[in-house]
Amino acid sequence: MRKQVQKERCTKIKLEKCPRVCCLYDKVQLAAARMLNADPSVIQIECNIPLSPDDLNLPSETYTTDFVIHFSDGKIAVREAVFRSHLSRPSIAELLELSRRYWQQQGIDDWGIIIDKECTQNEAE
């Protein structure tokens, strides 16, 4: 979950399973989008879906969820992409919890996070 208006660079890509061009704001989100696009059980991916601030008692800024995923068996899931190093930040934990509650109110219980792979010293070299 992130603010809808981003002041950072984005990578715009067209994915086979996404009806619109995806604007992806970090490496975790980009890797997750590619992974979901390659998953044969996924039939459609929606990126950066705006959340209604009224439903969450948020400030007037609009927040988005990273991915809404539609599976071939009819299930819908939500995933938020996060760097592992950011999970300890209280503000990130709060946003993730707000996202989870928002989607639960919308009737979607399959909510989760996608975390970047930790890089060991040997892999970095």
Image: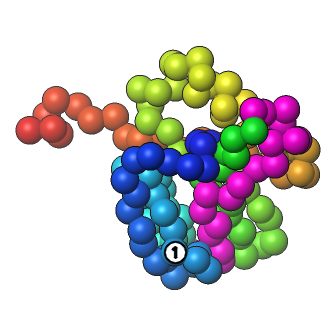
Query: What residue is shown at x 60% (from left), y 62% (from top)?
Result: 47
Which span is picked out in magenta?
Answer: 40-59
| Extreme residue in the left direction | 125
Asked whether residue 46 is drawn in magenta, I would say yes
| Extreme residue in the front direction | 60
Residue 20 x, y percent position in the rendering? 58, 77
Query: What residue is shown at x 34% (from left), y 34% (from top)?
Result: 118
Label 1 neighbourhood size at 10 Å, few (<14), some (14-19), many (20+)?
some
Asked whether residue 44 is drawn in magenta, I would say yes
Left/right placement of residue 115 relative to residue 11 reads right
Query: What residue is shown at x 65% (from left), y 74% (from top)?
Result: 44
Residue 101 x, y percent position in the rendering? 82, 36
| Of the pair 12 and 40, the residue shown nearer to us | 12
Query: What residue is shown at x 42% (from left), y 68% (from top)?
Result: 12
Instruction: State the SS at label 1.
Output: loop
Left/right placement of residue 52 relative to residue 65 reads right
Residue 115 x, y percent position in the rendering? 48, 40
Question: Disc 1 designates what residue?
Answer: 21
> Is residue 58 at all visible to an observer of this figure?
yes
Q: Is residue 3 above or below residue 23?
A: above
| Of the pair 33 and 14, the residue shown nearer to us | 14
Residue 5 x, y percent position in the rendering? 56, 49
Q: Is residue 63 above or below residue 38?
A: above
Q: Is residue 67 above or below residue 116?
A: below
Q: Say what amino acid the circle numbered 1 marks.
A: Val
